[in-house]
Image: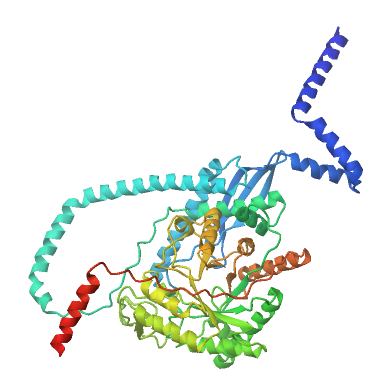
């Protein structure tokens, strides 16, 4: 009886096995691979079988997200994100990503108190981001396919909107309670203030009013959810994890996300490398140029161009050391957080002449073999409010020879020299005429100066790229905005920071390219040693990559990755040469046609005026 029962159980087990294998198509698949393997005759039989069955395995899914605090190149807190996944029935760490930090809106020369507040807010933001990643985001994208970037970004941005609504309701409730509690005391203070202002009314009326330039104020700063960089971090980390899952390089996966398939050939972007940094936060009187950059010729291999760039950097450094004396002390004072040298310049010509001299010293011709790019950082040199003279209690940092008196509503191109937007058009046009080696300027003025911006484009766009960085909203907003003829540019700089998801950046890259914009992938102020930026620039076919100075590990790691990609593409015969620089002309929009009768009325008025003059 025991023997009969065992036979029956064995028979039933075999029947279940047959059903199980047939339902999963195992016999058919084994027969197919056995037949094909016989004809292919591989040296590694089991490696051949393993590769085949791997294509039949279920796609990996996200199993867990782990986030912790890390640090960027400036020692500031940032987020390190780990993406774990279930791959062939095993839980594995797919990728670890360390995010770059968002640039602070504060200048380097602000009060210590302001810097402390900014540091505290940054820490709160990082702590909130880590909490969101380890809880809400971890739950939302569990069991999600990391290769489906659009779906991942859709899920996390839906979560962002939900959390933002909850936070806004909480803040609104707190504001109502504060108004209710302070209502009576506020009314009493307002009454006292009204009486006091009435008594001073006559005296106040006698005082003259200072004239300030009329300007369009900036848009209110977007209020992001505390911890918003969690959504950027997980979007980028998932993108990198997907490349690991697919066994391709990150730049190939990014290109596949954009085009739907991996292109046959790739181009390596031209490096925009910062040699000198100036601007409002730097010593000296020069405010209108924040970064002096060098750009190689389009057909110069990256390996060769980086050799020249290092020579240019070293030559400039030697010139400063020779003038400053005591090289070690001078070097400490000149190099900033991104590795650029920060000398005392009083005018832009000093930096331009020095760069051209350095290019010539390498046996090259400025304007032919190497070019110059300027990051003007227009919003930073614009004065929204009058600043007191140095020496008062509420002054900002005062550098030697720098007068802190400024005019409201103007661009202070140099200390003591303020210009309105119309004058700035002439300023930049004249500078580019005298220095034809300049082929790119970033943010020459604020985006609010639409008419002046377009007049500047009309004057210089046929020989120089006018690039917008802060002139555009972040990709999450830009993707839904309509591009008009009233504001155009030659290029746009994207950064992998703030609330910029991979999907949003890819959408905006396509949108801006269709509007004849060159694409620039730009590094952040607080960079890390993660090389996503370099891969991303290659994957989206960016024209330029802005990496900072050619020194410091977090900067050179991007260059080293580009050199590696260039060599890989050359070996596989997949390297596509870049086209020569193109400068499409940008003309201002046509003036609106006068309404019917308006032209005739003006003609009659002019005739009357002419008659009176006669």
> Is 355 situated left or right of 585 in this image?
right
> Is 182 in front, or is 529?
529
> Is 189 in front, or is 135?
135
- Position of the C terminus by quadrant: bottom left
- The percent coordinates of residue 312 (x first, y second) are 63, 84
User: Looking at the image, can residue 344 be seen?
Assistant: no
Give the residue drawn at x 15%, y 55%. 187
> Is 461 in front, or is 60?
461
> Is 613 in front, or is 115?
613
Give the residue drawn at x 59%, y 75%. 581
- The percent coordinates of residue 220 (x first, y second) are 35, 61
Quick check: 165 above or below 582? Answer: above
> Is 60 situated left or right of 383 in this image?
right
- The percent coordinates of residue 238 (x first, y second) are 60, 50
Query: Quarter of the image holding residue 286?
Result: bottom left
User: Looking at the image, can residue 415 be seen?
Assistant: yes
- The percent coordinates of residue 85 (x first, y second) are 65, 44
Query: Quarter of the image holding residue 371?
Result: bottom right
In this picture the colour scheme is: rainbow
- Position of the N terminus by quadrant: top right
């Amino acid at each position: 009886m025991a023997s009969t029962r065992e036979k029956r159980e064995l028979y039933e087990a075999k029947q279940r096995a047959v059903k199980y294998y047939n339902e999963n198509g195992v016999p058919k698949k084994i027969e197919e691979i056995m037949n094909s393997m016989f004809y292919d005759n591989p040296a590694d039989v089991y490696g051949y079988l393993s590769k085949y069955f791997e294509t039949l395995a279920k796609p990996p899914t996200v199993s867990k997200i782990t986030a912790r605090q890390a640090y960027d190149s400036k020692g500031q807190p940032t987020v390190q994100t780990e993406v774990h996944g279930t791959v062939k029935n095993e839980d594995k760490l797919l990728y670890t990503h360390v995010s770059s930090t968002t640039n602070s809106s504060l200048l380097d020369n602000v009060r210590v108190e302001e810097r402390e507040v900014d540091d505290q807010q940054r820490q709160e933001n990082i702590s909130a981001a880590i909490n969101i990643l380890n809880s809400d985001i971890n739950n939302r994208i569990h069991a999600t396919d990391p290769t489906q970037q659009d779906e991942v970004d859709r899920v996390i941005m839906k979560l962002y909107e939900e959390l933002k609504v909850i936070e806004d309701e909480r803040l609104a409730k707190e504001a109502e309670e504060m108004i209710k509690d302070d209502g009576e005391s506020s009314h009493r203070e307002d009454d006292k203030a009204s009486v006091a202002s009435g008594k001073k009314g006559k005296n106040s009326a006698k005082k003259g009013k200072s004239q300030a330039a009329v300007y369009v104020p900036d848009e209110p700063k977007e209020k992001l959810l505390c911890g918003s960089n969690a959504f950027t971090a997980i979007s980028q980390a998932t993108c990198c994890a997907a490349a690991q899952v697919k066994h391709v390089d990150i730049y190939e996966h990014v290109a596949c996300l954009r085009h739907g398939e991996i292109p046959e050939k790739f181009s390596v972007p031209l490096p925009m490398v910062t040699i000198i940094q100036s601007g409002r936060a730097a010593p000296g009187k020069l405010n209108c140029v924040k970064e002096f950059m060098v750009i190689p010729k389009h057909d110069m291999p990256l390996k060769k161009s980086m050799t020249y760039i290092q020579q240019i950097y070293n030559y400039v450094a030697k010139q400063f050391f020779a003038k400053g004396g005591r090289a070690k002390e001078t070097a400490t004072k000149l190099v900033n957080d991104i590795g650029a040298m920060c000398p005392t310049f009083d005018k832009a010509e000093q930096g331009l002449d020095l760069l051209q001299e350095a290019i010539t010293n390498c046996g090259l011709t400025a304007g032919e073999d190497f070019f110059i790019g300027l990051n003007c950082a227009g919003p930073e040199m614009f004065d929204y409010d009058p600043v007191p003279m140095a020496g008062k209690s509420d002054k900002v940092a005062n550098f030697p020879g720098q007068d802190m008196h400024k005019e409201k509503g103007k661009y202070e191109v140099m200390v003591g020299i303020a210009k309105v937007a119309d004058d700035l058009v002439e300023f930049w046009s004249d500078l580019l005429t005298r220095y034809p080696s300049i082929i790119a300027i970033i943010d020459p003025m604020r985006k609010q100066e639409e008419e002046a911006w377009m007049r500047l484009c009309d004057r210089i766009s046929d020989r120089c790229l006018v690039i917008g960085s802060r002139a555009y909203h972040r990709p999450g907003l830009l993707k839904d905005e309509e591009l008009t003829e009233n504001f155009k540019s030659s290029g746009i700089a994207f950064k992998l920071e703030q609330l910029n998801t991979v999907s949003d950046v890819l959408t905006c890259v396509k949108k801006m390219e269709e509007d004849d914009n060159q694409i620039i992938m730009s590094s952040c102020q607080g960079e890390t040693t993660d090389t996503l930026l370099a891969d991303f620039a290659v994957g989206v076919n960016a024209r330029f990559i802005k990496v900072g100075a050619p020194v410091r590990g977090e900067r050179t790691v991007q260059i080293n990755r580009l050199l590696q990609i260039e060599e890989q593409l050359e070996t596989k015969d997949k390297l596509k040469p870049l086209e020569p620089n193109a400068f499409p002309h940008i003309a201002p929009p046509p003036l609106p046609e006068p309404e019917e009768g308006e032209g005739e009325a003006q003609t009659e008025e002019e005739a009357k005026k002419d008659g009176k003059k006669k």
